[in-house]
Amino acid sequence: MFTNQPHLNNLSTAILSLDGDLSLCYVNQAAESLLQLSFKRLSGKSIFEVLPGFKEIENVLLNALQSNQLYTQRRAQFELHNGQMISVDLSVSPVFEEAQPNLLVELTPLDRYVKINREEVFREQQEVTRQMIRGLAHEIKNPLGGIRGSAQLLQSELPTEELKEYTSIIIEETDRLKALVDKLLGPNVPSKMQLTNIHEILEKVRRLIELEGGPELSFLRDYDPSIPEIYMDSDLMLQAVLNITRNAMQSLKATRHPRITLITRTDRQFTIASVRHKNVLRVEIMDNGPGIPIELRENLFFPMITGRPDGSGLGLSVAQSIIHRHQGIIEASSELGLTRFTLILPLEVSKP
Ligand SMILES: Nc1ncnc2c1ncn2[C@@H]1O[C@H](COP(=O)(O)OP(=O)(O)OP(=O)(O)O)[C@@H](O)[C@H]1O
Ligand SMILES: [Mg+2]
């Protein structure tokens, strides 16, 4: 009954079917990705081997089998085989297969929902802030040309070098302001979407940052070579990955054995901005630096948020807007010695 159920693969709830001795006889795709093991590796294994946390509810499972009782638990936490904890809503239903009692276990992951909702709220807030800043930047940019031109004209009329120094300051400062405003306005070119190999982008970034970071800095790479090419604007994507990786390099200045790790993987069933994708690309950029300063964490992706004296606080905001343009998301997590930026991009982006 449970050996081949393609329609169950479209669910975001993880479904596991257990036989009378609590071994796995079927899991859907959502369960494979929640448990981080393929069905091949799961099939026939005891549930306690893949979900050691289920030991706590062994009695409940046995009871459900013997007395045909349904069991549900909201906001339960269980340990996975790799020590990771999952938060789920749990439901256990006894079902009969060929007169043998089986158990149907449904696990609805909560973390994913919480994250998606947060991301949704953030996305809206950040879009509003970004629009405001763009509006303001335009207003500042417009008169800059006039100020610069007038200062140049004035400079040519001034009799002494001493006086010209003042107009030079006006010109230099308007140039500085223009550069800042251009950065604030972000990349304003229409996207050139083309089939791109993500590893080519990562390798370009690695070479650049290796040069900037010096010989001390080491790079670890763990790429999944089977990842297909996907439609993206490679210049923009390079900019996004570069901004994140450069931050990592800059944060490692005082770290002994500074190391940046680049990982690529594919994941199944991931919801981004309410759209569920069957397959997504996950890129992780990790460093072993001191971590993102606590006071920045909530607003990290907002423009002008910086922890560096010479930073403009635009790198992550620009990176995020590029990833959003590709229907993806960026997430960050950070603790002492491990900061991780994760990019999630839909793999089946159709050619626009
Ligand atoms: N990997 C990281 N480790 C520690 N802190 C980080 C990391 N990435 C970002 N940060 C913090 O987040 C801040 C914001 O980064 P962001 O790239 O947006 O701006 P910036 O680097 O300050 O300026 P720029 O516009 O030049 O990139 C940084 O100043 C830094 O304090
Ligand atoms: Mg930066």
Image (spheres, rainbow, N blue to C red):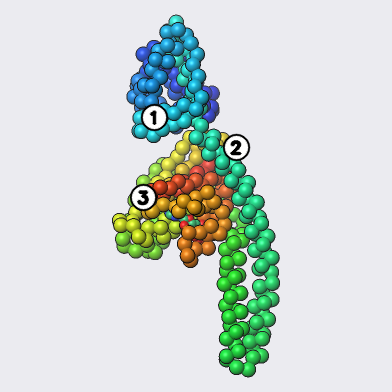
Q: What element carries label 1?
A: strand
Query: At 54% across and 23% down in the image, what residue appears?
Result: 7
Q: Is mark 3 on a helix, strand or loop?
A: loop
Task: Tell me, for residue 68, which label it has, or none.
Answer: none
Which sits earlier in the primary sequence, circle 3 or circle 2? Answer: 2
Residue in the picture at 51% in, 32% down: 110
Q: Earlier in the sequence, mark 3 or mark 1?
A: 1
Q: How crowded is mark 3: few (under 14 residues within 10 Å), some or many (20 or more)?
A: some
Q: Do the residues labelled 2 and 1 touch (CB within 8 Å)?
A: no
Spatial CA span between label 2 and label 1: 28 Å
Instruction: Check disc 1 and report the residue beneath it.
Output: 79
| Residue type at numbered disc 2 | Ser
Q: Which mark is residue 337?
A: 3
Residue 348 or 251: which is nearer the viewer?
Answer: 251
Give the image location of residue 298, x and y in percent: 52, 49
Q: Do the residues labelled 3 and 1 touch (CB within 8 Å)?
A: no
- Give coordinates of residue 269: x percent, y percent: 51, 34
Q: In the rendered image, which residue does mark 2 sit on?
A: 274
Residue 265 screen position, x and y as percent: 42, 42
Q: Which of pointers 2 and 1 lies earlier in the amino acid sequence?
A: 1
Q: On screen, 70 above or below 314? A: above
Other-residue count near label 1 (Cα within 10 Å), few / some / many at <14 / 14–19 / ≥20:
some
Residue type highlighted by circle 1: Glu
| Residue 272 picture location, percent across and down | 56, 40
Image check: 273 left or right of 286? Answer: right
